[in-house]
């Protein structure tokens, strides 16, 4: 049995009772004979939430999700759960999470169930446990692996993009009943995430209120962090080959022969198409151009234009106006070719990377 | 234990009892001492169904299915389930879904079990819960991830196609016993579906009657929505490269030499074959031509014809009739090549996109 | 707990008891006070089996299996299971399948357990349920998704092949004890299988006797259906490109130059190798030639021979016998090239498709 | 609950008790009042093991494992498990495997637990059951699908290799306590394995003693079988294309021009590299050369040498020694080229396939 | 139910009780009437840990993890668990692991729960069991398959790299309460790991203290081993083809013609790009250059420079300074080309492989 799911479930049930039923839970619990009730609008339950990501097992930018091994911790204090250590024989009771939920439900206490808002796959729990002190303080810990949606991915600056990753814990109870506070010291990113492609940093806990499962405003604690790419990969697999191919193409234009140039540029056209497809295999089918797309497309178009230009030059030459052709050619080689490519890159850098 | 499955299962059992057994359940329940029975042909049970899709985890057009994280909600009122709040001590009872099913079965009440008609994979339940008010009102909620068949996909207009996605909830009980009504305010598509390729919209609940598991007409509530593709991907990966390659090919034809033209057109032939295969990798092996297939095939055939035409011209020239060859050539270059390609595109647009 | 597995399991256990133990179950049951026993060699239990395939989720011809969502139904009548509706208070008892098995085992009744003979993966049960009438009639239904072996695949006529798919339900009890009859009206293929590549048809139930788990003859009900491929895919991805490339190659041969021809044919050689590999990626590594393999291999060999032939012609020409070369050439171009390819196709059609 | 695992587990526990504890189990059982004990060094338990492989679902030679659907059977007789049929009311008791283990543990009997030594994945049990006769004879059967390690794969003769597949059942108890004998009639390979690439044969049961989980010698029954490849695939995808390309290359050398030859040989170089990579995709990254690797590498090196040779010839010609060049050339074309390739193949056949 | 998880869980719970509660467990247990307590700061529990890796099912260097089938063993002695063999009737009690945990928790004994620190996937347990002697000695064994993070992978020397693999078992209890010692004789790598690509060796147990789940220093026993690659694969798939292509390229330069050289070098450029991409498919997108990357990039750049150099030479020749061109050329061919490539390799070997 999935213990952590159990904790959520019964909490969810309790929550539904409290909310949909339209009747304050306080009443029930009063009937159970406990005096100071928490988890009510008069006296909301304060719960500390800690989110510690131990491993990043994958970042799938096509599916826009990431895999993580995470240690979740929650702590709260509920007098209703307090017990007499004398009678029980010890100060602490340890529970399977499901047993704690059962116990709490029996005595009418609120278990601050949570949902991982952006959970995408099943959650495989490695370990989970809960302990209860005689004064009613509860500690819950859970280590698990799961896949999480990362819907904020934006590839416009690809591969110079910075992406935001979220791990959102939402309370099943509305904010009136249960409020969350972050456990900063038990949260953040681990030291050995095992992720080579991304530089993950800027991890922080953010508290907010969102519409929860119950349909009302509920507290959310989110671990937010950012990722930038190591650029070496893109430099040596994309930018350097493109730079060398374009430079060599430029050099070859100095060999002065229109026919050969056309062949070389035609070859480059196909290379650009291949690059185009190779790069698109790494990304989802986007509805916009990335920085890299923009550069490739412009270079592709410019290379196409160069071919047409050379065809025109050759026709000039064939029709006897070789002087005009040569003059135009000198311009094109010495200025348009290099400056054109540079202008494309420059504009792309300006429009994509500098302008926010 | 899969709670949601339990709810369906026992409901299914109850349904089978009612239908295959050929005996009205009313009788049994009357024996149990409850006066106003619901879930009978005289007094069918009205159930509200809400289907809220939170995430689209994937759209697999080859397998014709899609993955979703969904929140299902059901609500109904059954006097048979009412209880005395005084005696019980509170107004609301919370249940694991399986416990509710057990309870309902014990007292002879109908649990309006449902089946997800187009479910394809296992359903991984993140959370599920049910609550029961003393007046017999029940609320059920379930968050889960699963894969759903999308058999209505039709790629004829690809990549300008609009696809229909379904999420079909079918009652296990025939319409006589249980009728469904849509909970529109708890249904629809979420704000952060996390899907980049498709523009998903036009979500609506549709109510109908289909043949259910029991073999009789049963109520169905379906969340239907539509998807259109972002076209940028197809423009920069398919249409723009093809346009440039075709234009460059045309320009090269002005260099007036039959031999070279044949080589260029031969290269284009291979490029079309490569495009052909690359595009087919994204789609199932269809029994019809898509818009894009049609264009590619026509251009492929026309390019083949161009080669044969150039071979003929060259043979004319070799056999001394260079004048005739040149005349024919001017026609072909200046008119047939561009107009032919344009005609293909025009006809495809007309036949595929304009005619319904 | 997997309920449907439970039904099989305990039935299997009962079966083992009956068979391996060598003692008739009748005796035990008599002790339990029931007079007419079914499920014995004297009085075998008649069980109706319905197999309805709702979705085909995949056809993996490399692994020779297919995925399906299936609704299985079984019905039988066993007086031993009859009960007094007065005493029980109603005419029908509904069971979780596992509870029914337990109940039947307790009173010594036979549960006609089955095994899906060609099941390959785990079986994910969406729903399952059973009901029992007071006269001892039982109805069992189960909706599940699983992968099934399809070992009868034969690709000799690929892509014009017709494949046979099976869904084999085998009784765990030998035919002496339990006999199966088909429920035709509850069987067959659904209307929205969601399969684009195959035309699935000719579904029928077949009853036979096979050696079962117990090692003795057991009844089998099999849903058998056939699949043919939509040919559009193969026409536009394989046959049309090949036809155009071969025709263009032929046209080019009229340009009369041996050297160029060799280059063109050499290019075609590589194209055939590429096609060869591309096609083999779709099929398992077979121990025989398919129709398509045969055509590709023959064309490949013939293209190789053409190159050698042109080399010979050129050597003739170089050594001064250009007249002989030209004469031979005219034959080859005008007759051997087209007729040779046509003969290959014709022979393949005859040997593969016409001769059974 | 996984029943078959339960049987192993508790048996394992019992085994650990017997061995690690250092105390004979006989003593305990004597206390339980049973006189003839089996499963002790004085009187080891004889267990028959049957391994029937029904389907081969995959052979993954890169991961060196294979998938199977298997029917495992075990039978043994333990007087300690005998019961009084009069008292019990019947001669046979049927058990869930886990219930049998519990029963046996209660009365101090040994359950001959086993481990599948080379199990790699989870084991999905389709069915499992056990029956017990009043004289203490037990029959256990289990149908399941799993992935098994195949660490004996040796690709040196690839694709003419013969591989050995194992299915190893190891007793958890040392041989002193439990001895295994093969059930040959219930073992072997099925008739419809559904495997197209391999010819699987020579299946046999082998009994041996290995170090088991307890750290002492334990009995093992292994189903061993052998697989050879259908060669058609390799002939038409590798050997025939290579033969044709090499032959055509040879023919082209008769066209007498060093420059062209270099181009052709250069093209072949790239083709060999492509073949090299294509073949390596099917195999793990081995630490040795296979037969096919050896041939490809040698041909690759020889083709490289041919290019260098032609460069030398051309330099001879350019420097005026055309006669010498032509003489050397005749040798190379007529003798070295074909004989060299033949020698490579011949040596490979001798060194790899003939010498063991 | 996952037994091994149960052991961890309750141990974890106990641990949390001991630590978070801030109250010594001794007190509770004293209340239970046992005199010599272990698992306290005064008397920590000594636990032997054995880690035996039986199979390596995969090494995924892109995801930086590896799959293993592992046999974990733990042994410890706790007087609190001792029992009276007379009273119990035997000297040894065998337990399901979960039952042992329950028993220990009941009598207040510590179960030395552990966590696999670098576990990444779910853990599929093949078998697990525990036994308890009357003197309080416990033996626990578990065979399971799982995926483990390998975050120490460093590809700088690829493919001559040596990688470190870990299997880290961390105590849930802090070192004060539970200390670990290695069971060397029950640890290490098996004989048939089934891994072809890596030579795995130098396996050793390492004991250390890390911050555990409880947030305090906890004992860790890690099986550490190293892997080196079989180099044959890289020699025949990468180094040999590159060496041959570069050598042939060099030979071709002796044919003295600038135009052809440019074409050859241009072809090599594309081959280097293809190699570049092919190699990157095997590794994650790294933030640094590997040995192989470095060589490929340098050769790529040098080939680009060669083309530019040849263009310059040709322009010299065209502008009438053929003598200068030839002189420069001789230098380049005879010295710079081979020495340049050798220098690249030499520098790479020095900087990557020799300097640590």
Image (cartoon, coloured by chain):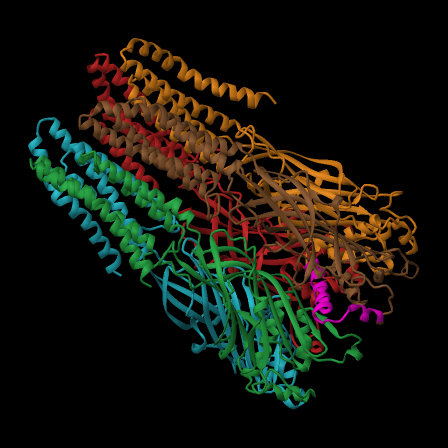
Chain colours: A red, B orange, C brown, D green, E cyan
Residue E52, horizontal then vertical, whole percent: 46, 71
Question: Relative to B137, is D136 on the left or the right?
Answer: left
**Looking at the image, which residue is at 78% across and 64% down?**
C40
Q: Vertical placement of D130 versus B325: above or below? A: below
**Looking at the image, which residue is at 12% across and 44% down?**
E334
Q: Vertical placement of B10 versus E102: above or below? A: above
Q: Vertical placement of A259 versus E244: above or below? A: above
Q: Nearer the viewer, residue C22 or D216?
A: C22
Locate the C terminus of chain D and report the quarter of the image it occupies: bottom left
Q: Main secondary structure of the magenta part?
A: helix
Residue B308 shows in the view: yes
Is residue C5 found inside the magenta-colored segment of the image?
yes
Q: Nearer the viewer, residue E51 or D310?
A: D310
Residue most toward the bottom? E86
Question: Relative to A23, is A235 on the left or the right?
Answer: left
Q: Vertical placement of C1 versus B160: above or below? A: below
Residue C60, horizontal then vertical, whole percent: 54, 46
Residue C159 shows in the view: no
Is residue A331 found inside the magenta-colored segment of the image?
no
Residue B265, horizontal then vertical, whole percent: 35, 24
**Looking at the image, which residue is at 46% across and 32% down?**
C346
How many numbered discs sit on the rendered protein? 0
Residue C221, horizontal then vertical, whole percent: 70, 51
Quadrant of residue D92 within the rendered picture? bottom right
Locate the N terminus of chain D and report the quarter of the image it occupies: bottom right
* Magenta-drawn segment: C1-30
Quadrant of residue E181 within the rendered picture? bottom left
């Amino acid at each position: 049995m999935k213990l952590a799911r159990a904790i959520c479930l019964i909490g969810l049930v309790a929550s539904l009772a409290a909310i949909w039923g339209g009747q304050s839970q306080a009443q029930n619990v009063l009937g159970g004979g406990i005096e100071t009730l928490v988890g009510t609008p008069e006296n909301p339950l304060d719960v500390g939430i800690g989110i510690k990501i131990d491993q990043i097992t994958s970042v799938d930018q096509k599916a826009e999700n990431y895999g993580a091994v995470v240690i979740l911790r929650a702590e709260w204090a509920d007098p209703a759960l307090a017990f007499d250590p004398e009678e029980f024989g010890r100060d602490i009771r340890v529970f399977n999470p499901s047993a704690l939920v059962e116990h709490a439900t029996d005595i009418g206490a609120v278990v601050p169930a949570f949902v991982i808002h952006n959970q995408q796959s099943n959650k495989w729990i490695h370990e989970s446990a809960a302990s209860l002190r005689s004064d009613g303080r509860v500690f819950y810990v859970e280590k698990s692996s799961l896949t999480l949606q990362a819907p904020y991915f934006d590839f416009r600056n690809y591969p110079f993009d910075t992406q935001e990753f979220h791990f959102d814990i939402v309370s099943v109870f509305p904010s009136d009943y249960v409020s969350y506070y972050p456990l900063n010291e038990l949260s953040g990113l681990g030291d050995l995430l095992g992720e080579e492609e991304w530089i993950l940093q800027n991890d922080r806990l953010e508290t907010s209120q969102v519409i929860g499962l119950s349909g009302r405003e509920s507290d959310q604690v989110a671990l937010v962090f950012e990722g930038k790419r190591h650029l070496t990969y893109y430099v040596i697999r994309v930018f350097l080959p493109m730079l060398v191919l374009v430079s060599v193409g430029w050099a070859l234009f100095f060999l002065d022969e229109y026919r050969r140039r056309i062949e070389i540029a035609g070859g480059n056209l196909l290379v650009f198409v291949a690059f185009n497809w190779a790069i698109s295999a790494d990304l989802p089918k986007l509805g916009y151009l990335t920085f890299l797309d923009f550069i490739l497309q412009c270079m592709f178009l410019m290379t196409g234009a160069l071919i047409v230009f050379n065809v025109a030059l050759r026709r000039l030459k064939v029709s006897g106006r070789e002087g005009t052709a040569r003059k135009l050619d000198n311009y094109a080689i010495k200025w348009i070719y290099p400056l054109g490519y540079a202008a494309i890159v420059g504009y792309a850098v300006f429009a994509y990377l500098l302008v926010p």
